[in-house]
Image: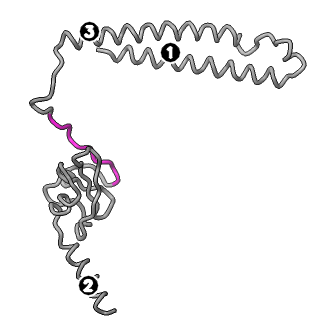
Amino acid sequence: MRFGLLLVSLGASAASAATLNEKAKESGCVSKPVFVAGSGDMYKCATQSGASSYFNVPGAGDGPLPGSASANSSSSPGQPVRSAKAATPSGFPRVDADTQKGRDDLRRKVLAQELAAEEKLLSESRAQYADGAPAPLPEEKADADKYRVRIARLKQTVSVHERNVEALKKELAAIR
């Protein structure tokens, strides 16, 4: 029994001696490990598949290692650390300006068509809603709850179309 405890403690000691680079290699990292703020001794990196890998480096719980991306950040504790945008690889395909302009024009045209259709639906739903006082249907004259439910549904439809129109206008304004 005593021998088993000795092996376990030796295994833990050997694991704590592992360096950041060794742990990153074991985790299959293809990017530089980044310290996860507020996690003690946790690091994160990207793997070959594009997934994130998290791992501990015991004894590094005092913060990021010198030279790591998070060690040089000036954010206050508790604030998320934002990494710098990676440079575009040299072999990455580029789209020429005319092609991009054509795509933007097509997108603008599609959004304009969607906006016109949504504005038409908004005006129709506003007409049905009639400022919260549409004429009751024959089956609603005897049941006030049915009438209230229909008014609520019409009001919700108007607000959905209003939000859609606002979102489409915002998208159109964002196109360069």
Residues shaded magenta? 78-87
132 or 140, nearer to the observer:
140
Task: Check disc 1 and report its element: helix, strand or loop.
Answer: helix
> What residue is pinned by disc 1?
165
Q: Name the kind of residue labelled 3 in the image.
A: Gly
Image coordinates for residue 56, horizontal then vertical, percent: 27, 64
User: Is 38 on the left or on the right of 71, as rendered?
Assistant: right
Which is in the foreground here, disc 1 or disc 2?
A: 2
Circles 1 and 2: CB atoms closer than 8 Å? no
Please give the residue where the numbered disc 2 appears in the rendered image. 7
Give the residue displayed 17% in from the left and 62% down from the top.
20
Q: Main secondary structure of the magenta part?
A: loop
Report the residue that reaches farthest toward the right. 142
Q: Is residue 163 left or right of residue 101?
A: right
Looking at the image, which residue is at 71% across and 23% down? 152
Looking at the rendered structure, the kind of residue marked 1 is Val
Mark 3 and mark 2: Cα distance apart in space: 67 Å
Q: Nearer the viewer, residue 162 or 47?
A: 47
* Mark-to-mark CA distance, 1 and 2: 67 Å
Provide the residue designation for mark 3: 102
